[in-house]
Image (spheres, grey):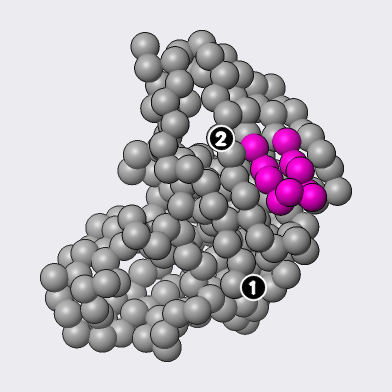
Amino acid sequence: KAGVTQTPRYLIKTRGQQVTLSCSPISGHRSVSWYQQTPGQGLQFLFEYFSETQRNKGNFPGRFSGRQFSNSRSEMNVSTLELGDSALYLCASSLGRTQETQYFGPGTRLLVL
Amino acid sequence: GEDVEQSLFLSVREGDSSVINCTYTDSSSTYLYWYKQEPGAGLQLLTYIFSNMDMKQDQRLTVLLNKKDKHLSLRIADTQTGDSAIYFCAELDRDDKIIFGKGTRLHILP
């Protein structure tokens, strides 16, 4: 079974731009969660989608949004990028509920200049 | 809000046991996890424990949970160079969100 894939793996943007990251979960998995990882704040939960609905949300500003498609693939979008948005963005998928085993992708490293 | 704390660094000699400690604040946590992150990679779930358990063993890994003190530990027996990584403790909070600690970097000495 293929693992969780994330594209692109690396991205460089400038302040004020917007960015869209993509995550393809493991086949059959319906839950996709997004996390931001920075050296200072560690891993922080962004949001979780299940069957195309946002089921849970972390404490991030409205510039961070996401969606999930009928095939369970998910995208997250960050608008009006700030320098502090530079981070590793990790996506994780699981079969159903969050409590189950989450499988992480390799992440997308975003650098905002 | 909920918080998960763990020490940032641990150095252990190859062949010795590594013990990584973690404390959490949400007494209603139902699941507690240990993840491993190797350089340039995502997180790999090593093991998890239900809050009604005290201990879980899986090959070289032993997880101990002291629910009264909200203390979780991960013991890696016979530590190998391949165990060098960052280990994250995490809890499932009452809102069904996974809260991670900042990670413990395990360094293996020859």
User: Magenta stretch containing residue B66, yes or no?
Assistant: yes
Can residue A96 be seen here? The reply is: no
Chain of the residue that carries numbered disc 1 in the rendered image: A
- Residue B68 coordinates in the image, percent (x, y): 79, 50
Give residue A39's position: percent from left, percent from top: 33, 55
In the image: residue B53, left or right of residue A66: right
Instruction: For mark 2, give the secondary structure.
Output: strand
Magenta range = B64-73
- At a point 59% along the width and 25% down the height, the residue shown is B76
Residue situated in front as seen by the camera: B5 or A70: B5
When the figure is inspected, residue A90 is found, relative to residue A16, above or below; the finding is above
Q: Position of residue B20 (x, y in %)?
A: 56, 35
Residue depicted at x 44% and y 15%: B13
* Viewer can see residue B34: yes
Coordinates of residue B29 in the picture (x, y in percent): 74, 60
Point out the image quarter for the C terminus of chain B.
top left
